[in-house]
């Protein structure tokens, strides 16, 4: 089938079959070709959808909706036709959708509110700092001084660790600490 007219006829046949609901696989079996060839045929016959095509389709749909709106708006107003009024509302909804008029407008507010809320890291940091602030003033000062010195310098100044003699640290529980096993 190298004749261009037969290729065009085949492409038209494939397009009509797909439009009527037949699967690409069923068409490929009937024509004894691959599904890829059926898809390639559709790519040749269907319009290319790029931004310019989208703009044209939207403009055409808006013109069609305007014509419908003119007719049914007059019926809704002049004859108080409830069905025509409902159709007018549907037409207006469709126009708003095509034009992007129903898109969320408070997106920036949501983002600002999210930025104002403290992060989980900040909440954890605040909880730790609050626990440190509840310590006795002398202990708090010691903790701050250790932080200023850094761990290496603090250990150097404090000297070697003197544990229980068995290699473990002495356990000095805080009032709320559970007892070790």
Image: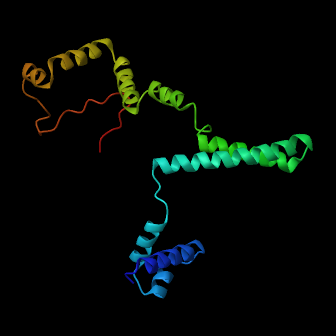
Percent across and percent down for residue 93 are 69, 44
Q: Residue at x 60, y 40 (%)?
A: 99
Drawn side of residue 133 relative to residue 57, left or right: left
Q: Residue visible at 38% across and 24% down?
A: 126
Q: Nearer the viewer, residue 80 or 54?
A: 54
Image side of residue 138 versus residue 70, left or right: left
Which one is in front, 133 or 6?
6
Q: How many numbered discs?
A: 0
Q: Quadrant of the N terminus?
A: bottom left
Image position, residue 152 (x, y; %): 10, 25
Report the side of 77 relative to 54 (left or right).
right
Instruction: Name the residue nearer the viewer: 55 or 97.
Output: 55
Residue 20 vs 143, above or below: the answer is below
Residue 2: give x, y in percent of width and height: 37, 81
Q: Quadrant of residue 181?
A: top left
Q: What coloring was used for the rendering?
A: rainbow
Work out whether 144 lies above or below 102. Answer: above
Q: Quadrant of residue 168?
A: top left
Tell me if I can see residue 90 in this picture.
Answer: no
Residue depicted at x 53% and y 32%: 107
Residue 86 visible to the viewer: yes
Above-or-below relation of 120 to 130: below
Q: Residue furthest right?
A: 79
Who's the residue at 27% across and 16% down the image? Answer: 139
Left or right, 108 with reference to 155: right
């Amino acid at each position: 089938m190298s004749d261009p007219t037969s290729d065009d006829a085949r492409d038209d046949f494939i397009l009509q079959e797909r439009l009527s609901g037949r699967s690409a696989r069923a068409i490929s079996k009937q024509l004894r070709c691959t599904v890829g060839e059926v898809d390639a045929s559709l790519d040749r016959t269907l319009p290319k959808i790029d931004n310019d095509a989208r703009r044209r389709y939207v403009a055409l749909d808006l013109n069609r909706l305007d014509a419908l709106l003119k007719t049914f708006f007059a019926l809704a107003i002049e004859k108080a036709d409830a069905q025509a009024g409902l159709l007018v509302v549907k037409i207006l909804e469709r126009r708003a959708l095509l034009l992007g008029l129903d898109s969320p407008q408070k997106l920036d507010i949501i983002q600002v509110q999210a930025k104002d809320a403290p992060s989980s890291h900040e909440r954890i940091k605040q909880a730790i700092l609050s626990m440190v602030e509840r310590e006795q003033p002398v202990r708090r000062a010691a903790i701050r001084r250790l932080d200023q010195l850094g761990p290496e310098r603090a250990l150097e100044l404090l000297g070697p660790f003197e544990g229980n003699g068995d290699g473990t640290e002495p356990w000095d529980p805080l009032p709320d600490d559970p007892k070790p096993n």
